[in-house]
Amino acid sequence: MEMYETAKTWLMELADRDQLWILHAFGVVLATLVLAMVVSFIIGRLERKAEKSSAIWLALLFRAMRAPVKAIIWLLGISWASYLTHRGADLELMSVVQTVRDVGVVLLITWFMIRFIRYGELEFLQPHKGDPGDPTTVTAISKLLKIAVVVTAGLVLLQTLGYSISGVLAFGGVGGIAVGFAAKDMLANFFGGLTIYLDRPFAVGDWVRSPDQEIEGTVENIGWRQTRIRTFDRRPLYVPNATFTQISVENPSRMEHRRINETIGIRYDDVEKMDDIIADVRQMLIDDDRMETDNQTLIVNFNSFGPSSLDFFIYTFTKTVNWVEFHSIKQSILLKVAEIIIGHGAEIAFPTSTVHVPEGLRLNEKSATRDEQNDDESSSDKTRRPEKVSRQQTKDSRKGEIRDQQSDEGEGSDGD
């Protein structure tokens, strides 16, 4: 009973006109909650219905606005509840609330537009139907649109906060000149990136190389200041965009065919088989479905008399541009050429040298050889004779020593 009386008293006090703002504020918050849930549910249903009817862009629009619309409802509801609080409690909140509300609305609209641009970019890169767009172009347009939205939102915020846009633009024009001189390299890279986006000499995923500088690899990212290229040894190479406005860039990824240009030599002894070999090699290339011989040049001809071979060359194109597949086809073609050469009883030549010696020079060499042999024999005899003489002298000297010793002994005996 006491609780009933307490509640009744509280309601009677609340019924006073001065306290109704609490109920109003509470009702506004509750209504905001319900309205946000209902709007979110309706937008979700519309999004799913648009997806089922293949209205992709309409579905992206609903998906992009779902969260920002809920946030705007809450922002407006809380601002209205703050207004009621301001009137009922005599609190100075309206100046702050109004500024926050205006800034919040601008930021939420900016958020919605950026979300829609991002979803559109993903749809172009990974479409539900059709072929994907060029990643370089799609990324460039997306970045430009986002920059435009952010810059516009910044100007609107300045105007909302009470700053003069004309003064800001005038200051930006004067300051832009100073910044341009101070950051000319950065601006050069920016316009270099813009040139890449507009001219599209290469795109993300292309294999590029420059004959002017040591730049070769696969393009991984094209930024506003620099481009990241992954070299074939898997190292990242960062190239300023201004560089591409000053050098030549080759894009092998956009080639239509790959070329086979080989020179093959056979022996001089197989010269009479050259015509048949060339005819069979040409026919083999025409019959191969992997070779483009209808719209591209096909040449198989005897080319030159080499130092140790008769050379003919093959000039043709493959249909594939894949690097690995091209080398597999080239290997198969060269092995078939070798089989054709062997099938005609010929051989592939290799570097050789033949020395021809005149007949007179041969006789002179033989006589010179005999003289050298005789000189060797005579020198060997001379070396042997002194050895014999020395041995004889040694024997004679030993005999003389023996005789002298005997005579000395005889003399000694006579004296005794």
Image: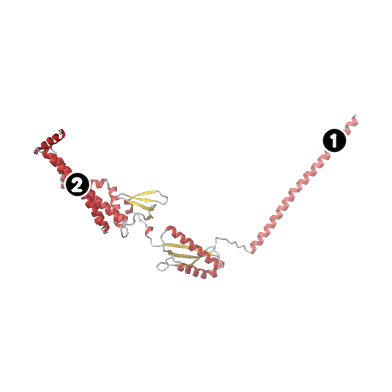
Residue in the image at 47% along x and 69% along y: 283
Taking depth in this image into account, of 94 and 133 the one nearest to the observer is: 94
Quarter holding residue 12? top left
Residue type at numbered disc 2: Val
Q: Is residue 91 left or right of residue 235?
A: left
Mark drawn on residue 405: 1
Q: Is residue 89 left or right of residue 323?
A: left
In the rendered image, residue 298, in percent from the top left (x then y), is placed at: 44, 67
Taking depth in this image into account, of 180 and 399 the one nearest to the observer is: 180
Residue at far top of view:
416
**Element marked by disc 1:** helix
CA–CA distance in space, label 2 to label 1: 152 Å
Tags 2 and 1 in contact by the CB under 8 Å rule? no
Evaluate whether residue 106 shows in this view.
no
Residue at far left of view:
17
**Element marked by disc 2:** helix
Residue in the image at 70% along x and 55% along y: 373
In the rendered image, residue 103, in percent from the top left (x then y), is placed at: 18, 45
Q: Which residue is mark 2?
A: 34
Residue type at numbered disc 1: Gln
